[in-house]
Every structure is written in C-alpha cells, then in structure tokens.
Amino acid sequence: MPVAVKDNYNTVDMPTTAGNLLLKDVKPAVESTVTRKLREAGAIILMKTNMHEFAMSGTTVSSLGGQTKNPYDLTRTPGGSSGGTGAAVASNFAAAGFGTDGVNSIRSPASANSLVGFRPTKGLVSHAGVMSASTTQEVAGPITRSVDDAAIILDVIAGYDAADAPTARSVGNIPKSFTASLDPKGLSGVRVGVLKNFMGSEPIHEEVNTAMANALKAFKRAGATIVEIDDPFFDANVFNRDYDVTKWEFKTLFNDYLQTLGDKAPVKNLSEVIASGKYHKPSLEKFLTATDALEMPAQETEYLARLSKIDGLRDHLLARMAQQKIDVVVYPEQKRLVVPVTELNQADRTGILAAMTGFPAVTVPMGFSKPSSTAPIGVPIGMDILGRPFTEALLIKISYGFEQATKVRKPPQSVPALRQ
C-alpha cells in the first residue's frame, strides 16, 4: 500500500521539515513509530505531504511548500493542518495518508476533501518520532477514502509503545481486529446525540446545515435514534478561545525536538527560527512570538487554569452522554465551507471538542455544497462522530453504517480517475 505521510512524522530516508524552509534537508536519525509499523507491515512511504507550517493553523500553507489547494475547488484551501495529506489522498496520489490532530488537523482535511479522518483516543496510537505541537491535544491517525481502510490501518498502528508513555492506556482496550466492526447495519439501535450549539445560524452556514439535516435523516432511516443536546456549555468558539493549550506547550516541544536532531539541526531553538525570518510570517508570526516569550510556560497560571477547564469539559461531556443515554455525539466538523486560499484562518471549525477531551472522533463525508464555476461537483462537507474513550470499534461500526447507507463520497474532477 503506497501511503502519504504528513511532513512532521520522522522518516530516516527522506527529510522531515514540518513545512519549514530551515529544515528542508534534515533527515532525522530515528523513524517515527507509526511509519516504522507501516513499513514492517509492507506499506511504502511514497511521499511526505505539505502541511500548515509547524501544524500551527488550518489552511495548509508553509514557507517550504507554499499553498496547497483543494482538488474539489482550486480556489479554496484543503483544510489543515494536514491538508497536504487530504489533497493527496482525495486526488488518488496514495492509497491512504497520515496526519496529526491537535485541534482539527486530521478531521478538517477529511471534511474538506470528502474523506474519512480518524482521530483515535489519546494513547491508542504512538506519537513517538512525531514533531509535536501539543502534548495534551495532539494525536496521530489515518486519512482514508473509506472507513474500512481506516479500520485496516488501525490494526497496524494501534498499541503500546515504550517510547510513548500514554500508549499504556491502550492495553486491554484494543479489539482483536477493528475490521470486525465493519457492519453495514451499524446504525440500527444506536442513540445519536446532536450538538445543537455546534450548528451555525447565519446565511453562510446554510449549506452545511442542509447537509447535516440530510445526514440525520439518513441516521433515522437506518434505525438510529436522534437525541438533541441543547446545552449552551458546548460552545466551540469558547473552547477555541479559552481551552486550547498549544501556546503553552509548543515552544518546549519544538526546542526538545531540535535537540533530538543533534548536529543536523540548522537552528538550536524557536528563537533562532523567528530571528531567521524563514517561516510563513502572515499566519505564524503572532503565535510564534507569543509562545517564545513565555519563559516558564508549564508554570503559567493561565496554562494550569486551562488544563483544569479541560478536565471539567471531559466530565461534563461524559455526564451529558450518560444522562441522555447517548452512544455517540455528532456535529459538522466545520459550520461553513472550507475557506478560500486568500484567507489566513479556517473559520468556524468545531473539532476542538475531541482535541480537548482526548476522545476519539471520526469525520465522514456527508455531502457537498451546490456546484459552482470553481467547484464543478461542489465543495465537500464532513460530519464528526465522537465517542467515549477507546470506543474506536463502535465508531467504526457507526461510521461504516453511515457510509454504506449514504455513499456520499465522489472523487474530485481536477485529477484523473483512479484506474482499476
């Protein structure tokens, strides 16, 4: 299986750059655990993909690779920060791909490219050998064209890794095979909670809302029960503003990663990157300057307060699911269509809920916008399905059931068809 890998996974036979010009020739000495497992299973690491530089934003632009475009609409971004992988898999450049997800970064490209993006429970898949942006929030996972491909890949990459302590949580929580959950009738009897507050209410949100309404009808036709979650606590804008801890974790993680490169590192720390000016300033300068200014970030009062809020969010979500007897929670991964390449930020994303809780979530295609002069079959729209910790088997069952009941996905017209 030829696979495309986001360029923050260490690969010893090709550079690992995180999209940064300074790192364009750096080949790390140690392979990431995920790519090692893939190679051992027979996969070919065919390419490294462009990403939003340092995985710091959601439009997939970098000083090394420039702007990646959406193959369904070349005027729009492919989501981010794993947008290069999303565009590559959607365009049939590889059979499957890999990204990292610290806020939305596996699921945003899946939504924008009519793909399946699987964010596993924190600790199911090793993060060793990945240039990380956040200890608390980030995980590694697959981006595929189908749910069954994602299940096959999880069988290969899931499991304990001595090089990544959080994977000890996975022991006893991995089924014999995730593929055993591929049930075409997987929606029958399932109670699905819909986050009302994760839906937009303005004209710009209408096409996504229409796709979501059609998805809920498909759930019902396939035997699921829809339960509305009307709780003002669940506000994605608030979570993005007041809960995200990347600012307090990135600097230390990045500087530590540079140390692992030894003499191969062209710079010693983040301060030197900033001083060089060799990074995508329009989207990164404000963030990099702010995180570099923190002298002891792990002891900052604001950081500790946010970690406490995250604990409260986990408990609140689990309590709500228990009270309403909900199996999974669903919502649009993005309230509006993916933004044009002229914009610096990916607006109205909701996937931070999974990133903050560490719970598993899978994005599946649920429709397209109306066709336009730049999007001949429309712009893809994706839905998140989120579950309790280590319920990946249930998520596979439900997402596969939805996929088989709807068969929404269509390949882009900007690339040749895949030959059989």
Image (spheres, rainbow, N blue to C red):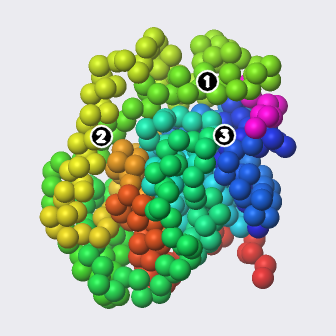
Q: Residue at x 35, y 48 (%)?
A: 357
Q: Secondary structure at mark 3?
A: loop
* Residue type, mark 1 in image: Asp
User: Alpha-carbon distance for marks 1 and 2?
Assistant: 25 Å
| Quadrant that contains the C terminus | bottom right
Q: Position of residue 243 (x, y in %)?
A: 31, 36
Q: Position of residue 70 (x, y in %)?
A: 60, 56
Residue, disc 1: 256
- Residue 372: x and y in percent read 51, 66
Relative to 353, 337 lies left or right: right
Give the numbered dot on residue 129: 3
Compared to 89, does 399 lie above or below? Answer: below
Label 1: few (<14), some (14–19) or many (≥20) C-alpha neighbours in 10 Å: some
Magenta residues, start to end? 22-30
Is the N terminus in the top left, top right, bottom left or bottom right quadrant?
bottom right
Label 3, label 1: how many angstroms apart (C-alpha)?
12 Å
Identified by mark 2, the residue type is: Ile
Choose between 377 and 246: the one closer to the eye: 246
Residue 79 appears anywhere in the view:
no
Residue 87 falls inside the magenta stretch = no
Q: Quadrant of residue 312?
A: top left
Question: Which of these two is toward me, 415 or 15?
Answer: 15
Residue 401 is labelled as: none
* Residue depicted at x 43% and y 70%: 395
Residue 338 shown left or right of residue 73 in the figure: left
Name the residue rendered at 41%, 21% in the picture.
298
Earlier-in-chain disc, 3 versus 2:
3
Q: CA distance from mark 3 to mark 2?
A: 26 Å
Q: State the residue position of label 2.
A: 310
Disc 2 crowd, CA 10 A, few/some/many (<14, 14-19, 20+): many
